[in-house]
Image (tube, helix red, strand yellow):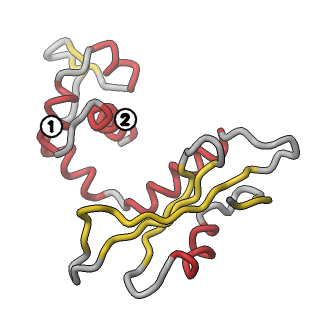
């Protein structure tokens, strides 16, 4: 699963925007990169294998996006630079996503915590349509539970 997420990320960073494009990009990756990302060797074809579109679709649709966001945020927090006191300085910001609407035709808003000065997102929550970002601070900070926070911008 880690391999599939890694090659899918590489494909998306290369411009893929749907499952078919992700599969096409992954199939075009050089053998040396597939090896470095952890592909299994296919003895029958004598190449490092890659997942099909169906496999990519099935795995990516089964992933809990909120849980993946927490895991990725924790990984980034562990590797983030701290200030002189060892404290992680975060900035909070809410954004309305253009062109993204919920079933009730409400705008979709995300509230994020980012490492100040770097802009790396370490936690993010969706803001319910009937409220605003202020009510989601506790929920957002729960995603930042592994670090001390001293200042907010």
Looking at the rendered image, the disc whose residue lies closer to the viewer, 1 or 2, is: 1
Q: Nearer the viewer, residue 57 or 25?
A: 25
Residue 5 place in picture, x, y as percent: 35, 41
Q: Residue at x 52, y 57 (%)?
A: 70
The tag earlier along the polypeptide, 1 or 2, is 2
Q: Residue at x 33, y 71 (%)?
A: 108
Task: Name the secondary structure under disc 1.
Answer: helix
Residue under the image location 65 percent in, 48 percent down: 116
Q: Which residue is mark 1?
A: 21
Residue at mark 1 to residue at mark 2: CA–CA distance:
15 Å
Q: Is residue 153 left or right of residue 101?
A: right
Relative image position of residue 4 (x, y in whole percent): 31, 38
The 10 Å Cα crowd at callout 1, few under 14, some 14 to 19, many 20 or more, is some
Residue 113: x, y in percent?
58, 58
Quadrant for residue 56, please give it.
top left
Please state the horizontal and vertical placement of residue 81, each as a whole percent of the image: 71, 38
Which residue lies under the disc numbered 2?
Answer: 6
- Under tag 2, what secondary structure? helix
Q: Nearer the viewer, residue 10 or 48?
A: 10
Q: Which of the numbered marks, if any, corresponds to residue 77?
A: none
Which residue is pictured at 19% across the width and 12% down the height?
Answer: 46
Residue most toward the right? 85
Residue 80 left/right relative to 72:
right
């Amino acid at each position: 699963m880690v391999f599939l997420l890694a090659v899918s990320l590489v494909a998306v960073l290369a411009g893929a925007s749907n499952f078919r494009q992700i599969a096409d990009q992954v199939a075009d990756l050089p053998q040396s990169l597939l090896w470095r990302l952890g592909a299994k060797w296919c003895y029958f074809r004598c190449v490092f294998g890659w997942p099909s579109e169906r496999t990519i679709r099935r795995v990516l649709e089964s992933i809990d996006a909120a849980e993946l966001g927490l895991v990725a945020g924790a990984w980034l927090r562990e590797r983030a630079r701290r200030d002189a006191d060892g404290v992680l300085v975060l900035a909070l910001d809410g954004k309305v996503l253009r062109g993204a609407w919920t079933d009730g035709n409400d705008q979709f808003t995300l509230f994020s915590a980012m490492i100040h000065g770097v802009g790396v997102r370490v936690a993010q929550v969706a803001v319910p349509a009937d409220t605003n970002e202020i009510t989601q601070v506790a929920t957002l900070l729960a995603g930042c539970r592994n670090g001390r926070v001293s200042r907010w911008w």
